[in-house]
Amino acid sequence: MTDTGMLRFHVPEPEVRPGGAPDFSNVPIPRAGSVPRPEIDVDPREIRDLAFSIIRVLNRAGEAVGPWAGLLSDEELLEGLRHMMTLRAFDARMQMAQRQGKTSFYMQHLGEEAVSCAFRKALAPGDMNFPTYRQAGLLIAGGYPMVTMMNQIYSNEADPLKGRQLPIMYSSKEHGFFSISGNLATQYIQAVGWAMASAISSDSRIAAAWIGDGSTAESDFHAALVFASTYKAPVVLNVVNNQWAISTFQGIARGGSGTFAARGLGFGIPALRVDGNDYLAVHAVAKWAIERARRNLGPTLIEHVTYRAGAHSTSDDPSAYRPKAESDAWPLGDPVIRLKNHLIRLGVWSEERHAQAEAEILDTVIAAQKQAEEHGTLHSGNKPSTRDMFEGVYEQMPPHLRRQRQQAGV
């Protein structure tokens, strides 16, 4: 036997660490409009290359180009811009509220607003999202009341979840938003199961699964792909690759697959990568995948290539693991600014109107915040009733819970 020496353990390293110069030279950015748009019923084997490219619509001049362009009207684009601006203003106010001690925890979407806001507008009423904690844009773009979202964040007397969930872990069946779980990746296989049940019952509703790049290392992710591909579940499998998990870079979870989208190829699932900071591209790819699911053509895996510009949460300090200027160097830019520039180029928007809209949206968010705070915050005002903790757990309350409720005097 040949002596090859001692074995060496390999640990992937990020391109740069805190104090270094940001480097995204390893992120190839194809020209906007250069990636073809396949037919809805294409054989997944014919589009394997889409798992390694990035679908883009908006070029650097703010023009919408290529075969994925032209699906949205000016009015729909203006609405999308307002949704992203609203989410950004909402985030800023709730981040400030956390720092003021009005809630215990918050997670921003800074830099990722296009992913959930654009995807939501491609869905139909009744479709169900199984989200992570960074898809509040699904609710904002779906018309869910901001006051109700804030009540949940504050865990006050009007919290629709009665204080049972961590702040920002919303839930609304009526708005197609399955309860968020802090146990990451569990929602992925649940989405596939829900989609299978929809097909079994001959329904018309599809599911959308959401996961971050770090959580794809969980076994639930792979189990979901097995079931989705085997049973051709009507589900869209979204991976939001924002480059960082809590404090580890994407290479730790990605392994040697090259891209997260490539994970779908081994399961025979069509896999696409999209510019997650391009509202038009996200919407177009979502429409393509959703139509494929509705036609009983099975699942699609979408990797949204974006960047988490802020901290992972209010408990995180990103300067400990990445350069402070890294977000400024991200080559795909800011989703709000890119859509704004596109609308200005179309002649339906302007810098002045944008500034006015920012002020109007901020006033709306502040008004909603005041209304929510009338019901209380973390350390002031009314809280959900103690009696609520005994309700909604079982269809019929068992004797031991009944006794505990009596002992609590509620």
Image (cartoon, rainbow, N blue to C red):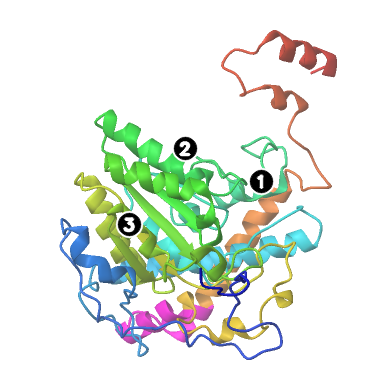
Q: What is the C-alpha distance between the residues marked 2 and 1?
A: 17 Å
Query: Which residue is nearer to you in this view: 330 or 99?
Result: 330
How many angstroms separate mark 1 from mark 3 (CA)? 43 Å
- Residue 263 falls left or right of residue 92: left
Disc nearer the start of the sequence (3/2): 2
Q: Which numbered dot is residue 253? A: none
Question: What secondary structure is found at the residue carrying circle 1?
Answer: helix
Residue 278 x, y percent position in the rendering: 39, 74
Say which residue appears at 46% left-offset and 46% top-offset. Answer: 188
Residue 370 among those drawn in magenta: no
In the rendered image, the quadrant that contains the C terminus is top right
Residue toward you, 215 or 66: 215
The crowd level at tag 3 (other Cα within 10 Å; few <14, some 14-19, many 20+) is few
Which residue appears farthest toward the front when viewing the image?
Answer: 1
Q: Residue at x 69, y 54 (%)?
A: 370
How crowded pointer 1 is (Cα within 10 Å; few <14, some 14-19, many 20+) is rated as many
Question: Which element carries disc 3, helix, strand or loop?
Answer: helix
Mark linked to residue 173 = 2
Instruction: Identify the residue position indicated by label 3 in the image.
Output: 266
The amino acid marked with disc number 1 is Asn
Asked where in the image residue 46 lies, by quadrant, the reply is bottom left
Report the side of 65 relative to 95 (left or right): left
Magenta-drawn segment: 337-355
Magenta region, main secondary structure: helix
> Which residue is at a point 64% across and 86% down the rendered structure image?
325
